[in-house]
Amino acid sequence: MAFRNDPDGTRLPVKVDPTSNGEFVPVPLDPVNRGANRLAHEWANENARRLGLSRRAFLVSSAGAATALLAFNRANADAGRTGGFFDIPQVAALDVEAARESLEGREFVFDVQGHFVGQHGLGRVGLGGSEEFIKDIFLDSDTDMMVLSFIPSNRERELLTIQEADETRRIIDAMEGSHRLLIHGRVNPNQDRDLDGMDELAERWGVSAWKTYTQWGPDGAPGFFLHEPGPGIALIEKARALGVKNICVHKGLPFGRRSYQHSLCTDIGPAAKMFPDVNFLVYHSGYISGETEGPYDPERGEGIDELIRSVEEGGIGRNANVYAELGSTWRFLMRDPDGAAHVIGKLVKHIGERNVLYGSDCIWYGSPQDQIQAFRTFQISEALQEAHGYAPMTDALRARIFGLNAARVYGIDVEEVLQRAGSDRVGQQRAEYRTAPDPHFLTFGPTTKGEFAALLKARGGPL
């Protein structure tokens, strides 16, 4: 077949690179990651030749993705990184059917953190466009549903207005009522009149949750804590009054040193204890890019460990009203199998197997299919399971994280959604498209400090 995108096959189907979601400075790949990418390219050349395929045709196949993940396994193992790995048989690199068996799943995939950037879209390649969004998310990946989220900004500088978000939802809803896209309402409770706007977001736009950034303040003002009198308590009480009791709060991925303390999860446990009828969805799970995650250390005071400490000291049980979300966190951890094993292992052990949520932070990272394939095959080593009491990555656990957990939070009837998805226009388009797929394997977010700085400037200044 003729390929419109990358006909020479220069891009790998699993995108391990420095791209960020625009909320943190891109972190360069280390020598092991760079070597892993080189090895994946070398194996792709050889395997395509052995199968008599063009390089592009091979990389678009499931065997292409399997080859990339197997190359990452080899490079990491050679470097002594064996705490986590992608559990794929070696034969999958040359056997498309074996690759499909490992990489293709039938889970309900509900991505609780997606992004669409509208007419004011910014990015290295140029984000924006509902058609590209739909292709990347629903045709080139196994995503069944998504929650469309927001980034921090003043109202006059929003990259995605609520009207643009609703326009995208309407496009998909118009496809025979598939209802595949939910939307957040962005709230800065420390910004004048923002709390007053929650009424319209709930009543006119039908938002399913609120998105807030405790470390953000307008015009350089400090952030806030959820559990203290003031903006945090006011936000939670207003959400309860409006009957939309899902609060998605950005934690981790700090915006530099300014209001750094508000980026930590210190307030999550106390807030969850004060308001047991509210669900607190902790975006990024408190993860800090570039920091090493190991076994749980309650004295650390940062990262995933601070989320766990706050929740446990607050008396919040496992599988209660605190949820750990993986957007950007999992994508970053794909380059670090040891860190990935500790993060997933700790969250399941301490927050609960029913309270870890899959999110991709796409379309900043292009199509999320590589994140899905990587998570679908990821396994924690037996050594770490035994040493730290981590649960193995079973099909049942992955299915919970991929979507069943989020369905409970958002009140989604999974059987109804999947039944409808089998015959809606998105499902029909996906089936037709996949007879001749043409993914671009691109990312959209900044990849260097310079690109990140340009994005901040275009937004009107620091986050």
Image (cartoon, grey):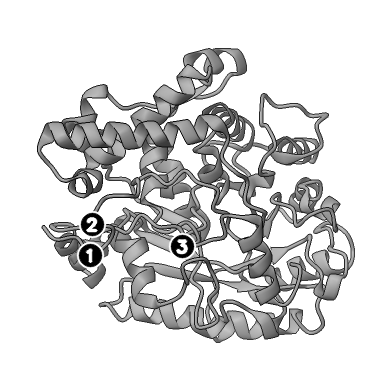
Assess whether mark 2 and mark 3 are in contact (beta carbons under 8 angstroms): no
Which residue is disc 2 drawn over? 7
Where residue 439 appears, as percent x and y from the top left, is 29, 58
Q: Residue at x 26, y 40 (%)?
A: 64
Q: Is residue 68 visible?
A: no
Q: Secondary structure at mark 3?
A: loop
Question: Marks 1 and 3, Cα distance to the nearest angstrom?
Answer: 20 Å
Q: Secondary structure at mark 1?
A: loop
Q: Residue at x 38, y 46 (%)?
A: 370
User: Which amino acid, by three-letter code, is at mark 3?
Assistant: Ile
Which residue is disc 1 drawn over? 4
- Label disc, if present, on residue 353 of the rendered structure: none
Q: Secondary structure at mark 2?
A: loop
- Residue nearest the observer in this picture, 401 or 278: 401
Left or right of 379, for residue 223? right
Assess whether mark 2 and mark 1 are in contact (beta carbons under 8 angstroms): yes
Q: Earlier in the sequence, mark 3 or mark 2?
A: 2
Which residue is disc 3 drawn over? 363
Q: In this figure, what is the number of numbered marks?
A: 3
Q: Is residue 435 above or below residue 39?
A: below
- Residue nearest the observer in this picture, 261 or 22: 22
